[in-house]
Image: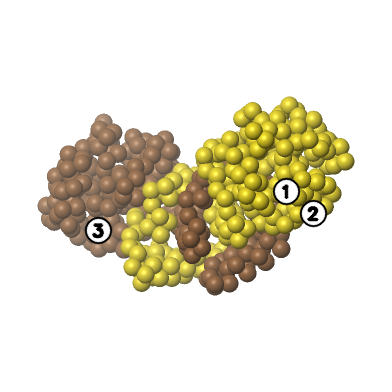
Chain colours: A brown, B yellow
Amino acid sequence: MGAVIQNIVMIGSGNVATHLAEVFYWKGKKISQVYSRDPEHAKQLANKVGSEAIDDLFSLTTDADLYIIAVPDKSIEEVAGKLLLKDKLLVHTSGSVAMEALSGASLNYGIFYPLNTFSKEKGIDFSNTPICIEGNTTSNKEKLVRLGKVISGDVRIITSEERQIIHMAAVFVSNFTNHMYGIAEDILESHELPFDILKPLIMETAQKIWKHKPADAQTGPAVREDISTIDTHMEILGKFPEFKKIYEMMTKDIVRRRKTRLRQGYGGQSND
Amino acid sequence: MGAVIQNIVMIGSGNVATHLAEVFYWKGKKISQVYSRDPEHAKQLANKVGSEAIDDLFSLTTDADLYIIAVPDKSIEEVAGKLLLKDKLLVHTSGSVAMEALSGASLNYGIFYPLNTFSKEKGIDFSNTPICIEGNTTSNKEKLVRLGKVISGDVRIITSEERQIIHMAAVFVSNFTNHMYGIAEDILESHELPFDILKPLIMETAQKIWKHKPADAQTGPAVREDISTIDTHMEILGKFPEFKKIYEMMTKDIVRRRKTRLRQGYGGQSND
């Protein structure tokens, strides 16, 4: 079938490019080329996935089925501006960059956005990573959905507006959550206490969302409006003025959200 | 040996009381009695752990080795005020209530604080849950450490001040993190998008801390100072003024923390 994507060119060699190229390779796709400005980076990834390394976009093969731009958001437009792919299917993997950034580079384009967080020395389970698909035509969407299903059990066609919303929600649960971990790290370090004491709690807090809605899983002094504990914490936070502001704002908003949801008729269950 | 705690009275029947009573029972300890103001609650837990249910503190047995108060923080002082245990060992399980709240109830008292989050319908892995111990004497600390080791591989003697710091850090990584999940839930719900799309990302974000320090795992538009994406998000958040304030404050603080750590000579690696 003509619609099946078999040969893929990976433009980029960072975390997303690496994890994606590897999983496609493991699933039997051919990574025809890996491009990076840095020849060493291109080679490193190309060697892992039996591919040709290139460091010049003029050396791009013209007969792949799909060209994936997986570079930092701020470079997507610049890279796309250098491509002339005629009708070859072109996607980027970003949660926030507009699909139209690709419209000058090919007649066929779309989005292949794996909704997860990728780091260098840590493998990732693609099988349950949502793949968010957009395409400028129905046929392009279908091709990309089929490709997504090769690596993930959760492939969704979304709109550009939905992608923006999802990406922003992801910033809250991932970037901001990680900053919460970082704040705790700073507080503990400053008292010469080890951060690792929090790791089981961090895992359990994440795991709870599979059983409970976040609203129902909310615990702690804020949701209980335990003023005495809140006051103690605010006092301890005296030497961290920024963290104190965050503590205050989060506490207020937890109370506000609980009251709003109670008014809306949701249950207000609070554990421990 | 006289120092081994074998017979335990559980005062309370909520999430912490239930999970603790169960794990002690499974590990071969005897739960002599379970107390709750609500006779039904007392019975429910007592039946699970082969124990006697009581709903009156005057019926408390006098010959247990340990009395555990696992009730809401705000009730600990009140419950302790009703106990006259002479020299029987008494602890509470709270991260924030002072140990001295118990000093009127017995000559021997301490803290047995399991640092995790407990919910009703979800089991918990105690084997790696840190158990934070305080005691008013060395002997009481030793007894409690020995008991902690029966259920956990991570038992630590801490000071009251350290417990406050740890509990506050826990509020950031658990309560505030869960609120981040809640904010994402509200944003997605308001656009009729399913929250479940974020679950793999939430798990992966938590799992990353086993490989990377939070500072090194920080990703996203804030740490990249990607103004265009931040502006888009601020615009989308127009109809959620509270979330917009939180977004702004978190973004600023992520930038601030990164710059502070760079000045201090830490690496500033940022993934994806």
Q: Are marks 2 and 1 on the same chain?
A: yes
| Amino acid tagged 1 | Asn
| Amino acid tagged 3 | Ala
In the depicted view, which residue is nearer to us: A118 or A186?
A: A186
Q: In x, y percent, where is residue B67? A: 74, 41
Q: In x, y percent, where is residue A24? A: 28, 38
| Badge 2: chain ID | B
**Residue sitting at x 75%, y 50%:** B107
| Badge 3: chain ID | A
* Tag in front: 3 or 1: 1
**Residue sitting at x 19%, y 52%:** A41
**Residue sitting at x 48%, y 55%:** A194
Image quadrant holding the N terminus of chain A, namely top left
Instruction: Name the residue beneath numbered marker 2.
Output: B104
Q: Is residue A176 above or below residue B248?
A: above
| Badge 1: chain ID | B
Position of residue A269 in the picture relative to residue A49 (left or right)? right
Circle 2/circle 1 CB separation < 8 Å: no
Decide if residue B131 is in sight here. yes
Q: Residue furthest front?
A: B1
* Tag in front: 2 or 1: 1
Residue A80 got which mark? 3
Q: CA distance from mark 3 to mark 1?
A: 72 Å
Please tell me whether mark 3 sits on a helix, a strand or a loop: helix
Instruction: Name the residue beneath numbered marker 1.
Output: B108
Q: CA distance from mark 2 to mark 1?
A: 10 Å
Please tell me whether mark 2 sits on a helix, a strand or a loop: loop
Crowd class of label 3 (few under 14; some 14 to 19; many from 20; radius 10 Å): many
The quarter of the displayed image where residue A226 is located: bottom right
Q: Are marks 3 and 1 on the same chain?
A: no
Q: CA distance from mark 3 to mark 2?
A: 73 Å
